[in-house]
Amino acid sequence: MKATRELGCARFVCAGSIMEYEVEATIHAQGSKPGMGYIYGMGKYIAYCMCKTVAVNSGIELVWSMITNTYGVGDFSPRFVNSTLRKIINGEPLQFTATTQNYNFVYVTDVAKDFYLVADKGKPYCEYTIDSGDAKPLKEFILEMVGACGSESTPLFGDVPFTGTNMPLDTFSIEKIKNDCGFIPEVSFAEGTKFTMDWLKTI
């Protein structure tokens, strides 16, 4: 943030994570035992706290974007959508938790559009959730993905223990970004996963 001020930037848009909310809920829960995976979200949350404080002191308009779960063409990571689609392509077993936890995914082109709109129209010192606006239990996303990309695959629910924190659906609300910035998601999960699978087959 100090370098931003020295460069003469008036506005700074950061890439936060929905994990920040999960970290806060988990850490403050009595008797909770957060795993090492939470360190990523902790880093994001601490960065937000520090950046916002320095930005206010420096007169820089900070806008914080809370990304949920991005996926799509060009992503080589082993994240959930990619790893599941690769298993479908390779005919591997699809084993999951009970998948009752609330979730959301957002296609990469919608994320890019989101960031443009937030940078252009976002209100200073506000945070905006970036997702598809269609949060629901993870199981429903999996069934949608299998229906669109792997109708011959059979998902197995409950084979893997769930150790995370289930966040309420309103955590994923995009009403603020819709109202302030005019964002309307364009790519459905079924479309996005099909685009992604077709691309994965070419690499």
Image (cartoon, rainbow, N blue to C red):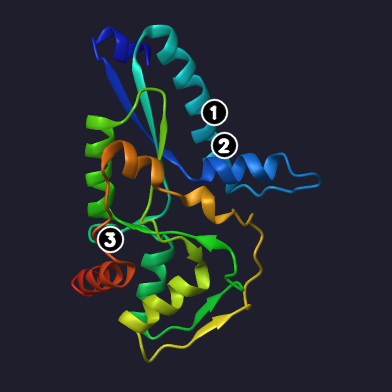
Amino acid type of the residue that numbered disc 1 sits on in the rendered structure? Ile
Q: Position of residue 124 (x, y in %)?
A: 36, 23
Please report contact status of discs 3 and 1: CB closer than 8 Å, yes or no.
no
> Given the current orientation, which residue lies at the most extreme bottom position?
152
Residue 137 to residue 56: above or below = below
Q: Quadrant of the C terminus?
A: bottom left
Cα–Cα span, label 3 and label 1? 28 Å
Q: Which residue is the site of mark 2?
A: 42
Q: Secondary structure at mark 1?
A: helix
The numbered dot on residue 72 is: 3
- Residue under the image location 40 percent in, 68 percent down: 83
- Residue under the image location 59 percent in, 53 percent down: 167
The numbered dot on residue 173 is: none
Amino acid type of the residue that numbered disc 3 sits on in the rendered structure? Gly
Q: Quadrant of the N terminus?
A: top left
Mark 2 Cα-neighbour bin, 10 Å: few <14, some 14–19, many ≥20 = some
Q: Position of residue 202 (x, y in %)?
A: 18, 72
Q: Secondary structure at mark 3?
A: loop
Q: Secondary structure at mark 2?
A: helix
**Nearer-N-terminus badge (3/1):** 1
Please report contact status of discs 1 and 2: CB closer than 8 Å, yes or no.
yes
Q: Is residue 36 left or right of residue 119?
A: right
Residue 106 image-quadrant placement: bottom left
Q: Which residue is the site of mark 1?
A: 46
Q: Is residue 161 visible?
A: yes
Q: Is residue 49 left or right of residue 104?
A: right
Mark 3 Cα-neighbour bin, 10 Å: few <14, some 14–19, many ≥20 = many
